[in-house]
Image: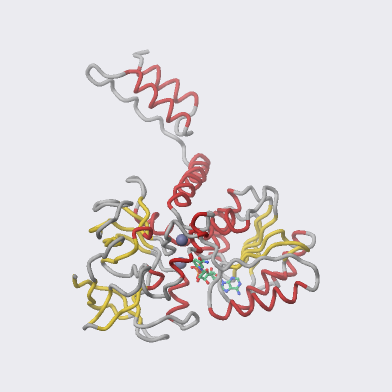
Amino acid sequence: MRTIRAGVLYEPNQPIRVEEVQLDDPQAGEVMVKIAAGGVCRSDLHAINGEWRMPLPMVLGHEAAGVVEAVGPGVTRVKPGDRVILNFSPNCGVCRYCVSGKPHLCETTRKYPLGVLPGGGTRLSKDGQPIYHFARTASMAEYTVVHESGAVPIPADVSMEMAALVGCSVTTGIGAVINTAGVEPGSTVAVIGCGGVGLNIIQGARLANASQIIAVDISEPKLEMARRFGATDDVDASEADPVQRIREMTGGGVDYAFEALGTGATVTTAFDCLRPGGTAVIAGTATAVSGNVAQKQHAKANVAQQQQAAQQAAAQTQTDVEQMQQQLAALQMQQAQATITPVAPAAPAPAAGGDLITQLKQLADLKAAGILNDAEFEAAKAQLLGG
Ligand SMILES: NC(=O)c1ccc[n+]([C@@H]2O[C@H](COP(=O)([O-])OP(=O)(O)OC[C@H]3O[C@@H](n4cnc5c(N)ncnc54)[C@H](O)[C@@H]3O)[C@@H](O)[C@H]2O)c1
Ligand SMILES: [Zn+2]
Ligand SMILES: [Zn+2]
């Protein structure tokens, strides 16, 4: 057991208290992670303002990355020193959801109530009283203990700040588009709420080659950012009725609408701006959202529209994280190529008795990755060959 500092919520609508609490050593199948970076997601805010009721007191935070400090007995997936992203959907790997590619719905994990680790119980306490773990991660702390599937290894070259965001908003947003909705190329998409999740839904829609991506927000800076992330159009919902504007822009409604705020009103907008047969994906989470989704589905059933509500849009497995890192790397590469004038790196000097073939191969790899263009590749090759 060790004493750590953590952010604890004791009551809704009260400030989080940063104080010392006790953290147990990892049990079998668990790992202790030293937190290096973390984001603040609206899910934390839903817990703070009571929109999402949680067992309290609780250490908040779930969007984070860090380094494995220690592992419990039987852990095979990670070892001390590994850099990891925390995963708030730990999974058993063998239940029917896990083996059918939906580990975020793992039924083994779901047997345990919110706030405790898979297997039961909390590893956090203060003066002998249990403190609950938000989203099974409790990352607003110096250290945390998670199930081993809740710590996904990442490559050495990903910054901790970037990795932390992949822990929730990136995976949720891109997962909602690619895994939950399965947006087809050429589709029209509306994104209602362009914060951490919404901006990544926009990135996901770009990856899916959507033809029109309409960003909806009430904040002008967010709409500007949405444009930078790939939105083709935007609607300021504080000035115009988003349903009417989206219908005008698309000639009748979008193929896919994504809700990324977590209010009844924006869930309504997501359903109402669809074309007949369109799909609404609800990434927002709050107690109020659930009832609203059920109501809207019931109402729409009468007009023969097909909608789908996915409140768990995220899919967080190692494979997902790896795929998304590659996809984001491809996006970043495109952006970098558009905005940065590439400078040809000096060709590596042949080491004594150096392997020229290996160095030529490295150059070819740089060219294949788009880092060197044809002319730069030829110049570097000539330099390497002494030309
Ligand atoms: N399903 C999941 O696994 C999952 C994961 C992460 C977050 N979430 C949920 O997704 C939601 C969004 O989270 P976030 O961290 O991106 O939130 P955020 O606070 O970063 O973003 C919300 C955005 O909505 C905008 N907004 C406010 N009022 C609006 C209105 N009337 N119309 C349009 N836009 C409006 C805000 O300006 C802001 O840009 C939350 O409900 C969160 O709990 C779900
Ligand atoms: Zn989150
Ligand atoms: Zn499972």
Q: What's the residue at 54%, 66% (across, down)?
A: 312
* Residue in the foreground of this view, choosing between 93 and 240: 93
* Residue in the foreground of this view, choosing between 247 and 387: 247
Quarter of the rendering occupied by the N terminus: bottom left
Q: Quadrant of residue 39?
A: bottom left
Residue sitting farthest toward the front? 95
158, above or below 383, in the image:
below
| Number of numbered labels in the structure image | 0
287, above or below 182, in the image:
below
* Residue in the foreground of this view, choosing between 383 and 28: 28
Could you say where residue 36 lies in the image, as x and y percent from the top left?
Answer: 29, 60
Q: What's the residue at 26%, 67% (across, down)?
A: 142
The answer to whether residue 172 is left or right of residue 244 is left
Q: What's the residue at 36%, 14% (across, down)?
A: 385
62, above or below 186, in the image:
below
Could you say where residue 241 lies in the image, as x and y percent from the top left?
Answer: 71, 73
The answer to whether residue 319 is left or right of residue 23 is right
Q: Quadrant of residue 300?
A: bottom right
